[in-house]
Image (spheres, rainbow, N blue to C red):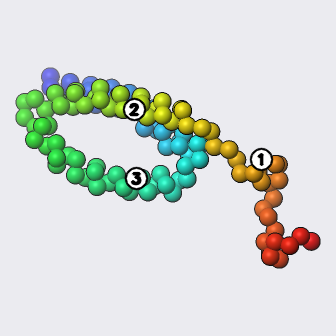
Amino acid sequence: KPVLMLVGLLITSKVAFAAADAAGPLKLQQRGVPKETLALLGVATTPISLLLPAAIARHTRGARALESFMAAVPLRLLLSAGASVLLLSLPAHAPPPIMAAGNTAAPNTANGGASD
C-alpha cells in the first residue's frame, strides 16, 4: 500500500507541475530573457540540486517519509502559482527598432557602415 501511494503521489504531482515547469522558460524567452541567461540559471542551481537531498535526508527516511513529501507539494504548488502570476505580469518584449520599422535587412557593415 505505501508503494501504491508513492506512485500515485509522484504521478499526480508531476502532472500538476508539468505546465509550470515547461512553460516557465518559454515565457521568459518570449519576454526577452536570452537563452544563455536561462542556461546560466540552470548551471547555478545545480549545486542546490546536488546538496538539497543530503540536507533533507533525515526528514525523508523512515516510516513517515511520505509526510514530508506531502507537506512540500502544497508549498511547491503555491510557488509555481506565484511564479506563473509573476511571469504573466512581466511586460512583453518589444522587437528591436530595426525590426519594428519593417526593415529586416541587416545593416551594411562591409564598408564601415557608409551608405552606397
Residue pictured at 77% horizontal, 47% vertical = 100
Name the N-terminal-most of marks 2 and 3. Answer: 3
Residue pictured at 25% horizontal, 31% vertical = 72
Give the residue number, with chain letter if any, for mark 1: 100
- Image quarter hosting the C terminus: bottom right
Q: Nearer the viewer, residue 39 or 7?
A: 39
Residue pictured at 43% horizontal, 34% vertical = 83
As drawn, is 7 to the left or to the right of 77?
left
What amino acid is labelled 2 in the image? Ser
Q: Secondary structure at mark 1?
A: helix
What amino acid is labelled 3 in the image? Gly
In this view, the residue farthest toward the right is: 116
As drawn, is 30 to the left or to the right of 66?
right
Residue pictured at 82% horizontal, 48% vertical = 101
Indicate the position of residue 81 as horizontal and vertical percent values.
41, 28
Q: Residues within 10 Å of mark 2 (few under 14, many from 20)?
A: some
Camera sees residue 7: no
Give the residue number, with chain letter if any, for mark 3: 42
- Residue 15, by quadrant, is top left
Indicate the position of residue 63 as horizontal and vertical percent values.
7, 30
Q: Secondary structure at mark 3?
A: helix
In this view, the residue farthest toward the left is: 62
Give the residue number, with chain letter if any, for mark 2: 80
What amino acid is labelled 1 in the image? Ala
| Callouts 2 and 1 close, C-beta under 8 Å | no
Q: Is residue 37 above or below residue 25?
A: below
